[in-house]
Image (spheres, rainbow, N blue to C red):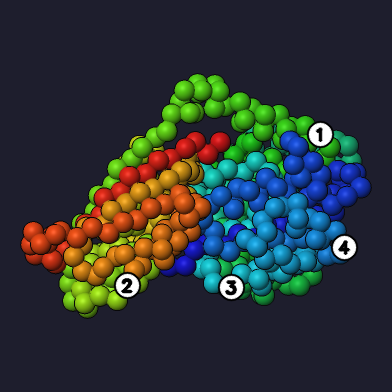
C-alpha cells in the first residue's frame, strides 16, 4: 500500500489581506503563512509525496522558498480559480492512492485532524472536516431578515479534505468546466459519490482578513505555552518504550526488514508481510507514548492489514503518534536470527527505517545477533526482534 500525498494550495493573491504580496508570504507568528502547513505535512512521513501549488508568476519561487520544503515537495504553478490549482497539484501526484488537499491559508490544522480525515477517506473514498455552526442563522433580503434558518444540520467546511486520488481525478474531469466549485468535496458529491463528514477543529481558522492574523497568532502563542502548562518536567522527561516480535520462518515467503527485501531461503510467516523489525519498532514507539500496541492499531482480523508492508505500518504508527502529540526521537533494535546474515544489509535497513520514521540516519540503529550454536531460535526456523524507542512531545 503506497503512502499518501498532500496537495498544499498556496497560490492565493491575498487581496482581502491587503498585504501587497501573495497571501502565502504574509507573516504569521514570525513565519510566512505557508510555512505552518508545510511543516505539519513534512513532519508526517506517511506523506511520501507533497505537492506545493504556488502563484503562477515570479512570486512562485519566493513562495516555494518560504515553505521550506526543499526537495521534499514538487512545486507547480496554480491556475486562475481554486479548482484549477487543485487540478494542477493533482496532476503532479505520481504514486499515492490517497490525497489530502489543504489550503495553506489554514495554518493551524493539527496532525490529529489530518489523521481523522485520512482515515475517513480510506473508508469512504472522500472526507471533509466540518464544524457545527454556533451562531443563529437567518436569510437576509434588502437589509431585512427574511426568515430564520435552522442550524441543526449545518456545518462550516474546512480543509484538509481527503480523497482516493482516482475519485478526485474523476470529479475534476467530469464537473462542468465553468463551475467554480467552493471545494473538492462539492466536486466529488456532484459525481454522485458519498463524502464523509468528520469533526473539524474550531482553531483551524482560515486567514482571510487582517484580523485573522492576530487570531492565528494568539492561538499559536497559546500552543507554544502549552508544554509549560503541562509542566516542564513532563515536557523534558524522555519517554522510553520496548517492543518485541517473533515470527516462524517458512519456505516461499520474502524476508523483509523495514521494507528492505533480503534474499533468504525462508521468510517470516504472518498476516501482514511479517516484518519483525517494523513490528517490534512500532510496538516500542507505541509503548513509549503509552498508546497500546500494534495488535490494537493493525488488527490481524482487519482485511486492510493483510500483507501490510512494514514500511507503511511504521509510517501509519508515526501518524498515530503525531495525532497524540508525540514524535519518534530514536530507535535501537536487535534482530535474533541465524540466517540470513544481517550485517551486509545493516546500512540499507537502517536507512529505510530512518526514512519511514522521519528520523535522521543516526536516529536509528539496527544490529543482527546469531544464537551461537545453541540450536537457534526454533531450531533456526524463527526470527525475533527486540527494540527500544524514545519519543518526544511534538509541540
Ligand atoms: Mg509480528
In what element is the residue under mark 3? loop
- The quadrant of the image that shows the C terminus is top right
In what element is the residue under mark 1? helix
The image quadrant that residue 108 belongs to is top right
Provide the residue designation for mark 4. 58
Q: How far apart are marks 4 and 2 (CA)?
A: 48 Å
Q: Which residue is drawn at 63% across and 58% down?
A: 101
In the image, the residue with mark 3 has its CB under 8 Å from the nearest atom of ligand 1: no
- Please say whether residue 40 is visible from this viewpoint: yes
Provide the residue designation for mark 3. 94
- Please say whether residue 273 is visible from this viewpoint: no
Q: How far apart are marks 4 and 3 (CA)?
A: 26 Å
Provide the residue designation for mark 2. 262
Provide the residue designation for mark 1. 211
Give neighbour class at mark 3: few <14, some 14-19, many 20+ (Cα, 10 Å). Answer: few
Front position among marks 4 and 2: 2
2 or 3: tag closer to the N-terminus: 3
Q: Residue at x 29, y 43 (%)?
A: 242
In the image, the residue with mark 2 has its CB under 8 Å from the nearest atom of ligand 1: no
Amino acid at each position: 500500500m503506497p503512502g499518501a500525498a498532500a496537495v498544499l494550495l498556496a497560490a492565493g493573491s491575498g487581496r482581502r489581506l491587503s498585504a501587497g504580496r501573495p497571501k502565502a508570504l504574509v507573516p504569521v507568528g514570525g513565519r510566512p503563512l505557508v510555512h505552518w502547513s508545510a511543516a505539519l505535512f513534512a513532519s508526517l512521513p506517511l506523506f511520501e509525496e507533497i505537492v506545493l501549488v504556488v502563484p503562477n508568476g515570479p512570486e512562485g519561487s519566493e513562495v516555494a522558498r518560504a515553505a521550506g520544503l526543499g526537495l521534499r515537495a514538487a512545486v507547480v504553478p496554480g491556475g486562475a480559480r481554486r479548482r484549477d490549482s487543485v487540478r494542477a497539484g493533482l496532476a503532479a501526484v505520481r504514486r499515492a492512492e490517497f490525497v489530502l488537499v489543504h489550503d495553506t491559508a489554514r495554518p493551524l490544522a493539527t496532525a490529529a485532524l489530518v489523521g481523522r480525515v485520512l482515515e475517513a477517506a480510506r473508508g469512504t473514498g472522500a472526507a471533509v472536516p466540518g464544524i457545527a455552526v454556533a451562531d443563529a442563522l437567518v436569510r437576509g433580503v434588502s437589509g431585512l431578515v427574511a426568515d430564520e434558518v435552522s442550524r441543526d444540520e449545518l456545518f462550516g467546511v474546512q480543509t484538509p479534505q481527503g480523497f482516493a486520488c482516482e475519485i478526485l481525478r474523476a470529479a475534476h474531469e467530469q464537473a462542468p468546466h465553468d463551475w467554480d466549485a467552493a471545494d473538492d468535496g462539492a466536486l466529488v458529491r456532484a459525481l454522485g459519490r458519498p463524502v464523509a463528514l468528520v469533526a473539524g477543529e474550531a482553531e483551524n481558522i482560515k486567514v482571510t482578513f487582517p484580523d485573522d492574523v492576530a487570531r492565528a497568532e494568539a492561538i499559536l502563542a497559546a500552543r507554544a505555552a502549552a508544554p509549560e502548562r503541562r509542566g516542564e518536567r513532563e515536557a523534558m522527561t524522555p519517554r522510553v518504550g520496548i517492543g518485541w516480535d517473533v515470527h516462524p520462518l517458512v519456505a516461499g515467503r520474502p524476508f523483509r526488514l523495514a521494507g528492505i527485501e533480503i534474499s533468504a531461503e525462508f521468510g517470516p510467516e504472518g498476516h501482514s508481510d511479517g516484518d519483525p523489525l517494523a513490528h517490534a519498532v512500532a510496538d516500542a514507539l507505541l509503548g513509549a507514548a503509552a498508546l497500546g500496541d500494534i495488535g490494537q492499531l493493525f488488527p490481524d482480523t482487519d482485511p486492510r492489514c493483510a500483507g501490510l508492508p512494514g514500511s507503511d505500518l511504521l509510517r501509519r504508527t508515526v501518524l498515530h503518534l503525531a495525532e497524540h502529540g508525540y514524535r519518534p526521537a530514536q530507535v535501537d533494535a536487535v534482530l535474533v536470527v541465524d540466517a540470513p546474515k544481517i550485517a551486509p544489509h545493516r546500512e540499507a535497513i537502517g536507512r529505510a527505517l530512518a526514512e519511514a520514521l522521519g528520523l535522521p540516519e543516526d536516529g536509528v540503529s539496527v544490529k543482527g545477533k546469531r544464537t551461537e550454536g545453541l540450536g537457534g531460535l526454533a531450531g533456526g526456523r524463527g526470527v525475533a526482534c527486540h527494540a527500544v524507542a524514545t519519543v518526544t512531545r511534538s509541540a
